[in-house]
Image: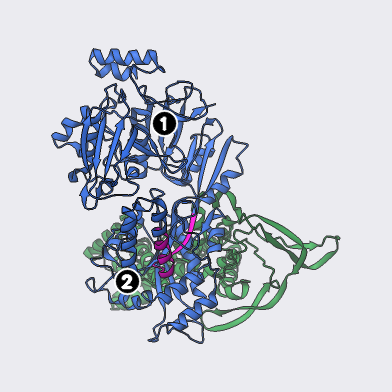
């Protein structure tokens, strides 16, 4: 029962985070590429409940920021004017999943006030909005890459385990080769020969394809192991004795036994691939400006001045921790659940 | 010094060195030392300086990179020097010089009785040897171009032991400035190497210290691969202060190899290095906070000679066969398109967001740091999207309902801007321009490339649409800029090495630049160069954006520190630096 709770909690948490990101346009107060050149590197906006007179407001409000005319990045809080946080307000238009256009935002403040709950970057773009929009790219990349590598893993691992012999040998040596290659440098080489005019969606597809193609080896080896033992089980041998075809055996009896491993692998691979996207973008191989991804949010930390002066630029990294934890929790719970089933 | 002598030299040279070591700082008999005007300093001590990379060579003739030159500058001297403080020429190894009335003949009178850092005397033969080396095409010296005037290399003749005459093929304004940075080489050490054909490999980092000799304030002491180069005081240096003390004051300079700007900033902040230059305004802001607590001082010297700009590919691509880019060149070649882009760019935001206010917006190619040559009448129009839209509409462009811009043939306006990934500022500029032009309905992509890959596209393959670049004038004089503005120039970026000027205004610039080069009167030259600046501002082949301020930092204990806007910003008066 306790495992069930853990799984349910993890899945709920994941569903929550994914829907935040799916509806990024709604939850983000601003467009991810909208610059406010008067407010570069603005610190996270403080929500206030008590005004200067000490009066309590149930609806939190914020104060405006005045930027130093000379020294960009130096701010004073302008308490003369306050902006209450409004819910369900009209704002910049956005698309939900590329299908519906809407203008309602979950929260915002009246212009010219700006609410930056996670601060702003060097172009005065809202970090929270960029984090939510960035998740669409990073998480989608992780999901597709994980699906791709697991599909390849099932196909190749299944074939290798089921047929054995030279096919097994060839596929597994191939898998080892894939594990041993220095992929990062290969990627740099690939990017260097690609044409200059590569669109953002092409970059994205490239990223996904590369991660998926590189990642198949590990799940394939695991699945091969499961298939190896599954095909020797009595009911499989019995079915074979009754004259079942290979195809029937593989799809009806053998592969279903790998479902636990597959689900666990997916839950493990998604955060790994999200991290891979972060790494690749950090190194300049991911989607470029002005689009946001989790990798591009963190890449500004490469500069010493950002690293040492603007602590809120770390927040996206901190926010990734619960997401990854949720995935690992799910993987853990899945593994235990299927272990108990198979016993 | 004595240690190096012991191991290598014959006894007579050793005795001479010992004599100098004992009698320093008094002058040797007959030495014509130059007296400097700096406040008096204290002898002794060492300063540590971070270098971005290992110098590639210590041979002044071959060096092409900043780090090599930074080290070589401390070990060598030139005949006539450009004062970093006044930006005017001043006497150096040549005590005085005369120019013939037609401006074609320069006679230089050398200081007498000077010695190289190994104690051997310097005279006109060394000068002759030096120019032979610089002019030898086999040596591929980056400075050789400067010595070819009117298509002919300068002709150098010895008049007597201490007099040298230079004959130019045509009058050349500011000819004396070409001597700056041309290091006088010791014929006694290098002549045989040169004759033997081994010059290209001489004076590398691994050459033993005893085989170096120069006329600079310091000389080679030690090289530790991957870590540092150490220079020691040259006891034969030819400058003394007002009190008669022979310069330099410092005993040693240590150049530490610190690979990136950020690492250099951290090392400086931590107190590992004493002087820091070539860092960004972002890091200036970081360092500023700790200024008093950590005992260093930051200097913002105002606009330097670097100008950053956006330009479009105006090359003739018919031979290169790049139809995709050629199609878009119809826009780039339209003056109104370029003017519209210039009007749409928000230069003030670039100054604030990229340079933290430590830069000057530019509308022309000469920076305010170059006070002698800037044309102040060039207009400074503020950003205006309305004007940009009008210009585009007058050029036949139109806006679709969703605001996107299409050209007269209905093709959407979409192009990419290259920037160098190693220069965070220029990438940031490109991103801001992308946003500005987005407001005009242009779909602009920013592509960051490694610097050399980018230069290859700009100057060789012409496979680009637009780029953000920066150039730093080597001198506050128009002539070294010839290569950029002449239509035949190798760095005439938007359309290099044209056989014939492609446009009437480029032909006009060619004519003006050639003319200013042979005009000797400053006022007349200024008038000609003003016209060049105006033509560039009117025709916007380059959309000038910003000139970053020169930022320098030094520890409080470094005395006589007087940074300047001309390279090398911090260490040009290294012989005068001392420790409090």
Q: Are marks 2 and 1 in contact (CB under 8 Å)?
A: no
Q: Position of residue B413 (x, y in %)?
A: 42, 78
Q: Position of residue B88 (x, y in %)?
A: 42, 42
Q: Is residue B533 magenta?
A: yes
Q: Secondary structure at mark 2?
A: helix
Whether residue A274 is visible here, answered yes or no, is: no
Q: Is residue A206 rendered to the left or right of residue B489?
A: right
Q: Nearer the viewer, residue A50 or B249?
A: B249
Residue density around tag 2, few if under 14, some if 14–19, many if 20 or more, within 10 Å: few
Mark 2 vs mark 1, CA separation in Å:
53 Å
- Residue B321: image tag: none
- Magenta residues, as a range? B529-547
> Is B362 above or below relative to A111?
above
Q: Is residue B404 magenta?
A: no
Residue at (26, 68) in percent of width and height: A163
Residue at (66, 57) in percent of width and height: A68
Residue density around tag 1, few if under 14, some if 14–19, many if 20 or more, within 10 Å: many
Q: Is residue A162 rendered to the left or right of residue B368?
A: left
Which chain is indicated by disc 2? Answer: B
Q: Nearer the viewer, residue B438 or B18?
A: B18
Q: Nearer the viewer, residue B50 or A108?
A: B50
Which chain is indicated by disc 1? Answer: B
Say which quarter of the image contains residue B183: top left
The residue beneath circle 2 is B504
Question: Hue of chain A?
Answer: green
Q: Which chain is blue?
A: B
Q: Quadrant of the N terminus of chain A?
A: bottom right
- Residue B254: image tag: 1
């Amino acid at each position: 029962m306790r495992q069930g709770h853990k799984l349910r909690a993890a899945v709920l948490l994941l569903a929550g985070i994914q829907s935040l990101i799916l509806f990024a346009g709604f939850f983000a107060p601003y467009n991810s590429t909208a610059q406010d050149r008067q407010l570069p590197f603005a610190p996270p906006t403080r929500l206030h409940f008590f005004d200067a007179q000490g009066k309590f407001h149930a609806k939190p409000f914020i104060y405006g920021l005045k930027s130093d005319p000379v020294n960009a990045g130096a701010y004073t809080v302008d308490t003369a004017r306050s902006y209450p946080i409004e819910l369900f307000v009209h704002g910049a238009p956005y698309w939900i999943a590329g299908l519906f256009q809407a203008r309602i935002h979950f929260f915002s403040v009246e212009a010219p006030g700006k609410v930056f709950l996670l601060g702003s970057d060097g172009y005065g773009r809202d970090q929270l909005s960029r984090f939510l929009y960035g998740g669409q790219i990073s998480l989608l990349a992780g999901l597709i890459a994980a699906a791709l590598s697991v599909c390849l893993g099932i196909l190749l691992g299944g074939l290798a385990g089921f047929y054995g012999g030279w096919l097994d040998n060839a596929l597994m040596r191939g898998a080892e080769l894939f594990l041993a290659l220095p992929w990062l440098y290969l990627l740099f080489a690939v990017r260097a020969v690609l044409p200059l005019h590569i669109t953002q969606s092409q970059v994205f597809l490239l990223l996904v394809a590369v991660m998926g193609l590189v990642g198949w080896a590990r799940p394939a080896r695991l699945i091969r192991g499961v298939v190896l033992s599954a095909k020797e089980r009595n009911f499989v041998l019995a079915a074979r004795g009754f004259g079942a075809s290979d195809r029937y055996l593989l799809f009806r009896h053998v592969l279903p036994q790998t479902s636990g491993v597959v689900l666990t692998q997916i839950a493990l691979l998604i955060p790994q691939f999200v991290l891979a996207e972060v790494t690749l973008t950090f190194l300049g191989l991911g989607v470029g400006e002005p689009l946001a991804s989790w990798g591009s949010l963190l890449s500004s930390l490469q500069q010493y001045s950002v690293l040492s002066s603007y602590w809120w630029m770390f927040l996206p990294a901190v926010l990734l921790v619960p997401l990854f934890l949720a995935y690992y929790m799910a993987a853990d719970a899945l593994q235990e659940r299927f272990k108990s089933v198979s016993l | 010094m004595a240690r190096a002598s012991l191991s290598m030299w014959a006894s007579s040279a050793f005795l001479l060195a010992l004599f100098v070591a004992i009698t320093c700082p008094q002058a040797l008999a007959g030495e014509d030392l130059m007296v400097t005007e700096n406040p008096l300093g204290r002898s002794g001590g060492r300063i540590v300086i971070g270098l971005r990379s290992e110098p590639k060579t210590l041979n002044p003739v071959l060096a092409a990179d900043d780090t090599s030159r930074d080290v070589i500058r401390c070990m060598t001297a030139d005949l006539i020097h450009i004062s970093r403080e006044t930006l005017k020429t001043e006497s150096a190894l040549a005590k005085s010089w005369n120019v013939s009335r037609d401006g074609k003949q320069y006679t230089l009178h050398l200081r007498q009785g000077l010695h190289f850092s190994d104690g051997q005397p310097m005279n006109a033969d060394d000068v002759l040897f030096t120019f032979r080396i610089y002019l030898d095409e086999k040596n591929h010296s980056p400075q050789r171009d400067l010595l070819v005037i009117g298509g002919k290399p300068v002709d150098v003749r010895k008049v007597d032991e201490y007099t040298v005459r230079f004959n130019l093929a045509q009058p050349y304004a500011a000819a004396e400035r070409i001597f700056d940075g041309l290091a006088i080489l010791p014929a006694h050490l290098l002549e045989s190497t040169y004759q033997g054909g081994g010059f290209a490999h001489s004076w590398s980092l691994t050459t033993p210290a005893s085989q170096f000799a120069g006329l600079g304030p310091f000389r080679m002491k030690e090289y530790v691969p991957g870590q540092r180069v150490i220079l020691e005081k040259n006891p034969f240096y030819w400058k003394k202060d007002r009190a008669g003390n022979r310069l330099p004051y410092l005993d040693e300079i240590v150049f530490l190899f610190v690979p990136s700007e950020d690492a250099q900033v951290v090392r400086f902040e931590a107190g590992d290095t004493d002087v820091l230059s070539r860092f960004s305004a972002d890091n200036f802001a970081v360092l500023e906070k700790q200024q008093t607590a950590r005992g260093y001082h930051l200097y913002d010297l105002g606009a330097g000679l670097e100008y950053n700009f956006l330009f479009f590919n105006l090359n003739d691509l018919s031979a290169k066969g790049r139809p995709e880019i050629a199609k878009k060149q119809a826009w780039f070649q339209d003056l109104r398109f370029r003017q519209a882009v210039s009007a749409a760019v928000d230069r003030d935001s670039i100054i604030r967001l990229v340079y933290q206010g430590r830069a000057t917006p530019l509308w022309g190619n000469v920076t305010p740091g170059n006070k002698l040559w800037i044309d102040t009448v060039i207009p400074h129009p503020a950003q205006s999207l309305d004007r940009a839209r009008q210009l585009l509409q007058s050029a036949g462009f139109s806006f679709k309902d969703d605001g996107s811009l299409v050209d007269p043939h209905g093709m959407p306006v979409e192009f990419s801007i290259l920037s160098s990934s190693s220069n965070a500022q220029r990438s940031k500029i490109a991103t801001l321009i992308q946003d500005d032009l987005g407001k005009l309905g242009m779909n602009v992509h920013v592509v960051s490339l490694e610097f050399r890959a980018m230069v290859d596209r700009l100057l060789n393959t012409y496979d680009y649409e637009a780029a953000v670049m920066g150039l730093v004038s080597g001198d506050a004089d128009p002539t070294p800029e010839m290569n950029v503005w002449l239509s035949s120039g190798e760095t005439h970026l938007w359309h290099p090495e044209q056989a014939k000027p492609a446009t009437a205004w480029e032909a006009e610039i060619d004519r003006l630049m050639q003319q200013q080069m042979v005009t000797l009167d400053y006022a007349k030259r200024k008038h000609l160069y003003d016209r060049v600046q105006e033509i560039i501002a009117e025709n916007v082949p380059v959309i000038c954006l910003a000139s970053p301020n020169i930022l320098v930092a030094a520890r409080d204990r470094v005395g006589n520190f007087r940074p300047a806007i001309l390279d090398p910003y911090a260490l040009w008066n290294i012989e005068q630096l001392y420790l409090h």
